[in-house]
Image (spheres, grey):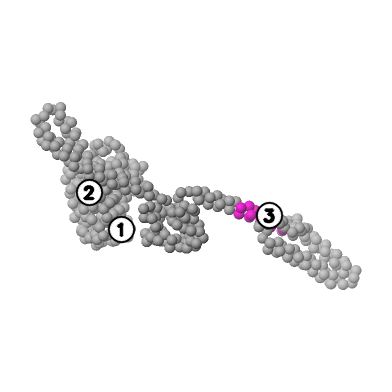
Amino acid sequence: MQYWRAEILRLLTVLAVAALIGWLAGNVLLTLFAGIGACLGINYWQLWRLRRWLRGNPSATQTGPPESLALWGEVFDGIYQLVRQEQKSRDYLESIIRKAQESSSALEIAVTMIDRRGSLEWWNQAAARLLGFQYPRDQGHPVTNLVRDPRFAQYFHEADYSEPLKLPTPGDGSRTLEFEIALFGERERLMIVRDVTRLHRMELMREDFVGNVSHELGTPITVIKGYLETIMEHVHELDSKWRKPLGQMLQQSARMENIVRDLLMLTALETKAVKRQQKPFPLAPLIREVESDTEQVYRRCGHSYQAECEEGVQIVGDREELYSALSNLAQNAAKYTPDGGAIRIEAAFVDGGEAFEIRVIDNGIGVEAQHLSRLTERFYRVDVSRSSETGGTGLGLAIVKHILLRHDADLQIESESGKGSIFVCRFPSERIRGGEKIRAVHQTPFPDQPPQINVH
């Protein structure tokens, strides 16, 4: 503020001197115009100096601002300070970017930056090694033109990056790469690529090992169980001390047989290709069959069963596989529901007809929240004692998950300890034929639920 006051005082002083000279010379108006012109000339000269200094790119040189006094000196110094601050910020950001690029160059994983048009912007050395990118030839080219695989193009353009994509290395089918993409900024993408060849081979070896071992164990376990069953038919002829051990041996051999059977099914689901042409079949009879079979197996428990599905509904898929999935869910509900419980199997459209859900609902012992995310893992146990009491293999929900994936569906689990569970098989509407989608607009697509079921 003091510079403005000084500048105004200086202008008034110049005008006063010009007026005095004009009065002495006998022409006040002429000298006043001359004084104003001199002030304007000085200001235009200072502007010219400022323009010449700015055109010299002060941020790229150590040259200081032009020397000046009063208000113009403040302007020059202020601009110079802003330029220096901007230069420091730029240097700091460039150092961070340089360090990030140097550190990413040392990584074994490929890091690639893609602009909003889908063109390559920057990549590290690992990306050049794994994907064959060459600088500067490939910079600015669409990434889908450089990674020439229809599956990658579909994955890239659909922009659903919740799951990584595994593909063979371009030009080298013996190696496997895993692609992960994240969106940031204005539809820009960060793509990370890993060489997972070793993990992929280990996974294949594990699948082969499990399949081969399960197949080899099947015959001896069947033989052992058969002999034990024959012995148990004449157990009254044996000493009483052998009855309990033989009974336990028969029980455990049956459990081993179930584990081998489930492992063989899992292996088949993982390795067997999905049928290209799947035909629709009625869903209501399948649900009633699952309900009836489960009721027969667990008749001793005294559960009440209820099935609800519109008769006209058909689902496109493998009937045998879907029976296995729903049967696993229904029997799982029966196993973990105390005697006299209620089990329901219901099917209807949801979300305005966008999806179709089959729900298996029970009012059993439920599952605590921390276990829900791991229930579909192989052999995962919420409580080890449960398996010994129920005879479960720990593979049922893993089988359900794989079957649903083969039918473009997913498994959702809602449960609370002591208040029952809801297992939801959610199918895309494209797999359903017929049925009234009007039910989907209801606030509760599955009415009349047992009050003791806790629905989240």
Name the residue that disc number 1 marks: 428
Q: Point out the tag, 2 or 3, that comes first from the N-terminus.
A: 3
Q: Point out the tag, 1 or 3, that comes first from the N-terminus.
A: 3
- Disc 3 crowd rating (10 Å Cα; few below 14, some 14-19, many 20+) is few
* Amino acid type at image mark 3: Gln
x, y percent for residue 161: 40, 55
Residue 232 located left or right of residue 386:
left
Residue nearest the observer in this picture, 268 or 19: 268
The quadrant in which residue 379 appears is: top left
* Amino acid type at image mark 1: Pro
Residue 357 seen in render? no
x, y percent for residue 112: 47, 55
Name the residue that disc number 2 marks: 327
Q: Which mark is residue 172?
A: none
Q: What residue is rendered at 46% in x and 58% in y?
A: 133
Give the secondary structure at mark 1. Answer: strand
State the separation of the CA atoms marked 1 and 3: 62 Å
Give the secondary structure at mark 2. Answer: helix
State the separation of the CA atoms marked 2 and 3: 76 Å
Q: Is residue 132 above or below residue 201?
A: below
Residue numbers of the magenta segment? 76-91
The quadrant in which residue 429 appears is: bottom left
* Amino acid type at image mark 2: Ser
Q: Indicate which label's residue lies in the foreground, 2 or 3.
A: 3
Looking at the rendered image, the quarter that the N terminus falls into is bottom right
